Image: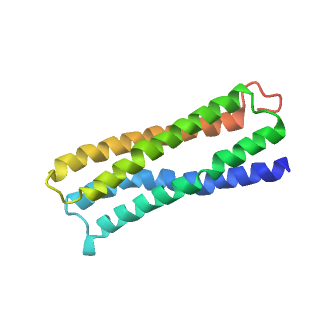
Amino acid sequence: MAKLLLSVHVLAAILVVGPIAVAASLFPRYARQAASGGGGPQGRDAGAVAVLHRICRGYAVVGVAVPVFGVATGARLGVLTDAWLVASMVLTAVAAALLVLAIVPGQRRMLETAGGPDGSGGTRSAAARLAMLTGVFNLLWAVVVVLMIVRPGSTTGA
């Protein structure tokens, strides 16, 4: 059973967190391009921005499966109190909070103000802030992945 839970956890992490990381990383670039009028034929960049936001929003909801199966796996293996897992859970919670409380709302605000009176300067600063937040989000996930692989103090770790 532990192998099944771990497999579902890893697959969910790859198939859910990966698309969020990519979509959130691409959003600021396309938002800047769309705001500067470089949207290409039929506003392609504006359409891409909307799709990238929908991906982040939708996958954030489905992303709950990653920690759920992670905790189930940890419970099954009896490692829920190990420091590496506790640290991973805290970092995952921080990454999730960053996504739900800052990145997705920031994207929504940029979509709502697209073409508004703030001009490209406001869009540039908002896009730069989103790019920074997304970088932190991705860095948190990278640290979680390393913790999951190395598992400091684990008798089965590398």
Residue 19 rendering spot, x and y as whole percentages: 52, 56
Quadrant where the C terminus is found in the figure = top right
**Residue at the spot 41% in from the left edge and 60% down from the top edge:** 52
* 50 left or right, relative to 3: left
Please indicate, yes or no, whether residue 17 appears anywhere in the rendered image. Answer: yes
> Image point 26% across, 54% down: which residue?
32
**For residue 118, above or below residue 47:** above
Which residue is situated farthest in the bottom direction here? Answer: 42
On the image, the x and y values in percent for residue 134 come to 43, 44
- Give whichever of 98, 33 is nearer the camera: 98
Number of callouts: 0
Point out residue 85 in the picture as x, y percentages from the top left corner: 69, 32
Identify which residue is drawn at 86% across, 51% down.
Answer: 1
* Quadrant assignment, res 87: top right
Q: Check the image and name the residue furthest to the right.
A: 1
Task: From this view, report whether residue 126 is shown above or below residue 56.
Answer: above
Instruction: Specify whether 140 is left or right of 4.
Output: left
Q: How is the image coloured?
A: rainbow
Q: Does residue 121 appear to the left or right of 13 in the view shown?
A: left
- Residue 17 pos. (x, y %): 56, 51
* Residue at (28% x, 45% y) in the render: 126
Residue 134 visible in the snapshot = no
